[in-house]
Amino acid sequence: MSHILPVASLADQKFSVSIPDGWESARDEEWCCYLPAHGIEERQGWKIHISATIEQAHETLEQVAQIAIEHGLPFKHLSTAERFFWRNSKLCAREHAGKFIALYPPLDKLDYVLEDLEKSLKSSEGPYILSDRRWSKAPVYLRFGVFQPHVLDGRVTTSFVDPAGNEVPDLRSVRFNVPKWAPATAKISKWLQQSDSREQELPFVVSKAIQFSNAGGVYQGNYKGSSVLIKEGRKHAGLDPMLQDAAARLAVEHRALSALDSVRGIPSPYAQYCVWEHVFLLQEKAPGVSLHQWVQSQKIFDRMWANQNFERYIESSFNILRSLYSTIKAMHERGWSHMDVHPANVLVDKETWTVTLIDFENAVEGKNESKVQQLMAAPGFGLEGEHNPQVFDFHGLRQIGIFLLFPSVAESLLNPNHADTIIQRLRMRESYLGLSSRSGILGTYIDFLEELGQETRHLCLSSDVTGSQEIYTYETVISLLEQNDFPVHDRAPCPTEGIFSAQNDEIRDEGQALKRIEAVSAAIQTRSFNQRWRVYDGMAGTLLALLQTHCHSRTIRQRVDQTIEDFAALYLETPEQFAPLGMTRSTLSNSVEHQDSGLFYGHLGYAWLFSRCLNEPLVAQACTKALENELTSYRLDSEGLTLQLSQGKRLLPYLSTGSAGFGIVLPHIPREILPEGLDKALPLLYRACDSTGSAFAGLMNGYAGLQLGRAGLAHLLDYDKPYQRSIDNIIDSLIFYGIHTSQSRLALVGEASTSPSLSIAEGAGGLLIALKTLQQQGTDFFWILNTFSNR
């Protein structure tokens, strides 16, 4: 039986305090708030924050609450021990981290409250709150901030108001900032003039910051003439499931690197220092890039590249895998296990082919007989339960081997035996990307993966999800899928408006359909831009759904056509109200709420709607303009080989948001109304979709959607067998993507990677839509939604 990790013991612990009569209290998921009878009198001022350790949290809360009540101060504290853990974990945003209790004193009480808190908490400890500055010795911190939302010029704001009445943003960051006009007592003014205790000289030189987290930073620097990697660990912060802080984990890494010094493929330690309250570990700076970055540079998902270079790529991958294996074996012989083997912890030097295993914070020392749990693991590379520590390393290494073949291992989160399933499927298919899976370099590579499996052969990993060893064909896949019911989305209800409203029975009633049309017409007439207009869950999608659902109703068709014409006129007048123009997107988000591009969320979706009514010149003009507007947000990749939607620092080729959507819309639009120059973009859009795989398998943001869009673009380019090739590509991809539920149903892993997905957006439903649409020699999948809604 597995031991319970310390973090699990926090699950039922709640924080609370007793308050006098006349006080009010309120509790939500995050905070417990307490107000005296007079409430919060100030709208801004000096906030006092208290941090603590988990061991001292209850005692600290009692002491602080007593002082707050004695002074009649509003205050709040975190509601549960789980929330406390999150606020002090590695992943918490640094500007919010460490804050356990907050007090809101008026200026005339501030000095007295600080004196009482310092005296009461002088022997307490807690993490430094980076957004604040410590008052003295105790874990008591200050920042000047807004106490509560307030009304300014008739609207609610959380900004400061300066002495002149101007609104000033209250910037919450990891730097301590005080407005020049902030009122202060004499003690506060003197305190502000003192030097910050954090400003101490370092015994090394930092030249570059690599990354930051609540646990600390990672830097590049110089130490006694040598280039070094500097890891910073904060005391009482960056907690892991064992409730160890970042400083404790760095101490473990220092011991591990010292014991493994001279092992090839492991960096050497230089020194460890404690400066101020932080621990710094200096180690050899290993050359190269992460294995993730190396795989991306190899363009293994680019089918044209893979067809020409796959054999060379497998040879390189095999060398990396064997080098890692040798390092791990040598490490085990010295009595240490890494416990977190995954691509981000492997560096590859492309010039010397040096392979280095890094990040030993979770390493454990012990012999083969001991059993432990894995504290942290990258999704798809870890194991649940207790095992010998060496097992975790070999399992992670084997998953890297699968990742190098096909950079998606999310399926292993649901089926820990998925690597065995992939190997068996590859053997049965005889070849993959033109190489024999039974001989040659790929056959040898797969043999090695099977040998790695022997290192974990004693494991009995049970799961409700299994792998099937059958050879998938179009017919077998369709038969496995057709018995299912398919929700629209795994993590959200079916939208009542938009393209998927065709699945709602209400829209099938002609009277209700006419009401929907009237609502859209009214929004157009009143220019209600605060409503949703996009295809996925807005009025453009509703009109598409009405056209399909009532395709035999002349009345509905006429009303919808007129509404589309009015829609087109409004769109031509103010297209920027419907979706952004140009390279303006900075948000890196996969949330439906934040999307504003492509077939489901952007200008391309409006072109899709307008393409249904091209007999009207105004609508045809709007269709052309919508295609032009969509392309303003696309850019070439770094090598000029593909054209994809630009969203911040990333490029998106997916059906719902990017390049693949063009393959759905363009085949139904006469070439004479396509924007000038679009014909030159077609090969670039096509190559963005013509991939060997994707991180996920589904329709909206995965491989099924890419292949559906690829087929439409291939058809426009007069490529051979555009639809059948996409069907074959999807079927082949199930070697890696396909999982089976306990009911023997074929499913895919959803984007949350927590359960088998049957949904249209992410799972088996979208796979079925793509395959059936392609089988009909087309890519406009909308017709099939009607058949789904009848189930």
Image (spheres, rainbow, N blue to C red):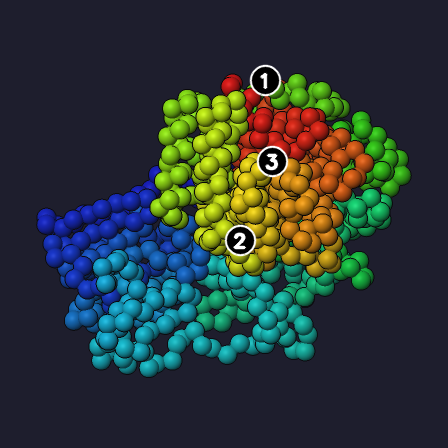
Residue at image coords 25%, 61%: 147
Q: In the shown orientation, is residue 477 left or right of residue 618?
A: right
- Could you tell which of marks 3 and 1 lies nearer the N-terminus? 1
Secondary structure under tag 2 reads loop
Image location (x, y in percent) of residue 663: 66, 40
Please tell me whether residue 423 is drawn above or below residue 162 in the rendered image.
above
Crowding around mark 1 (Cα neighbors within 10 Å: few <14, some 14 to 19, many 20+) is few
The Cα atoms of the two marked residues, 3 and 2, are separated by 20 Å
Can you identify the residue that label 1 sits on?
A: 483
Can you identify the residue that label 2 sits on?
A: 588
Count the marks: 3
Residue at image coords 47%, 53%: 573
* Badge 1 amino acid: Gln
Secondary structure under tag 1 reads loop
Secondary structure under tag 3 reads loop
Q: Is residue 672 visible?
A: yes
Image location (x, y in percent) of residue 108: 16, 71
Question: Marks 1 and 3: in contact by CB < 8 Å?
Answer: no
Instruction: Tell which of 99 and 173 is nearer to you.
Output: 173
* Badge 3 amino acid: Leu
Q: In the shown orientation, is residue 780 left or right of residue 303?
A: left
Residue at image coords 79%, 39%: 719
Residue 42, by quadrant, is bottom left
Can you identify the residue that label 3 sits on?
A: 699
Image location (x, y in percent) of residue 637: 69, 56
- Could you tell which of marks 1 and 2 lies nearer the N-terminus? 1
The Cα atoms of the two marked residues, 1 and 2, are separated by 37 Å
